[in-house]
């Protein structure tokens, strides 16, 4: 949930409030009791820092399929290498 900043137009009191985005904005100042609160516009208060924030951090290398050798017969005996024996 985001933290919103408010300032009272009557007394100048400032506060931060943790609210859902769907919540209605606060109107009543907790300091003076007047309906003068205004929501402030501010920068986001988080940083993407540390490992795990890059596209390549979540990708795993796929294992290479085993290489087939023409001189190794298959297990079923149905290939040309098994029939030739």
Image (cartoon, rainbow, N blue to C red):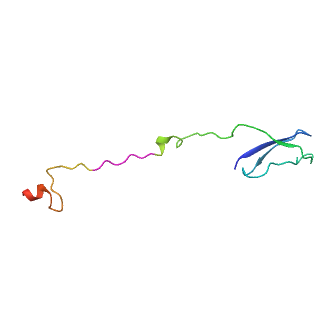
Decide which of 36, 57 is in the foreground and name it.
36
Q: How many marks?
A: 0
Q: Given the current orientation, which residue lies at the most extreme left position?
A: 85
Q: Residue at x 73, y 46 (%)?
A: 3
Q: Given the current orientation, which residue lies at the most extreme bottom position?
A: 76
Q: Is residue 63 magenta?
A: yes
Q: Residue at x 29, y 50 (%)?
A: 65
Q: In the image, is residue 64 above or below residue 77?
A: above
Tell me where the magenta segment starts and ends, as one range.
59-65
Q: Is residue 15 magenta?
A: no
Q: Is residue 33 left or right of residue 48?
A: right
Q: Main secondary structure of the magenta part?
A: loop
Where does the image place residue 55, in percent across and percent down from the top left?
Answer: 49, 41
Where does the image place residue 7, in percent across and percent down from the top left?
Answer: 84, 40
Q: Is residue 11 left or right of residue 63?
A: right
Q: Is residue 3 left or right of residue 84?
A: right
Q: In the image, is residue 24 above or below residue 7?
A: below
Where does the image place residue 84, in percent across and percent down from the top left?
Answer: 7, 56
Question: Residue 15 is drawn in which quadrant?
Answer: top right
Where does the image place residue 81, in percent across and percent down from the top left?
Answer: 11, 55
Q: Residue at x 74, y 37 (%)?
A: 42
Quadrant including the C terminus: bottom left
Question: Residue 45 is drawn in which quadrant?
Answer: top right
Q: In the image, is residue 16 above or below residue 76?
A: above
């Amino acid at each position: 949930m985001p933290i919103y900043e408010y300032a009272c137009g009557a007394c100048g009191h400032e506060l931060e409030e943790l609210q859902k985005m769907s919540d209605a904005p606060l109107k009543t100042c907790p300091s003076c009791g007047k309906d003068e609160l205004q929501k402030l516009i501010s920068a986001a208060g988080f940083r993407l820092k540390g490992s795990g924030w890059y596209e390549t951090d979540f990708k795993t290398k796929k294992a290479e399929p085993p290489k087939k050798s023409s001189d190794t017969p298959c297990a079923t005996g149905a290939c040309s290498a098994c029939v030739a024996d």
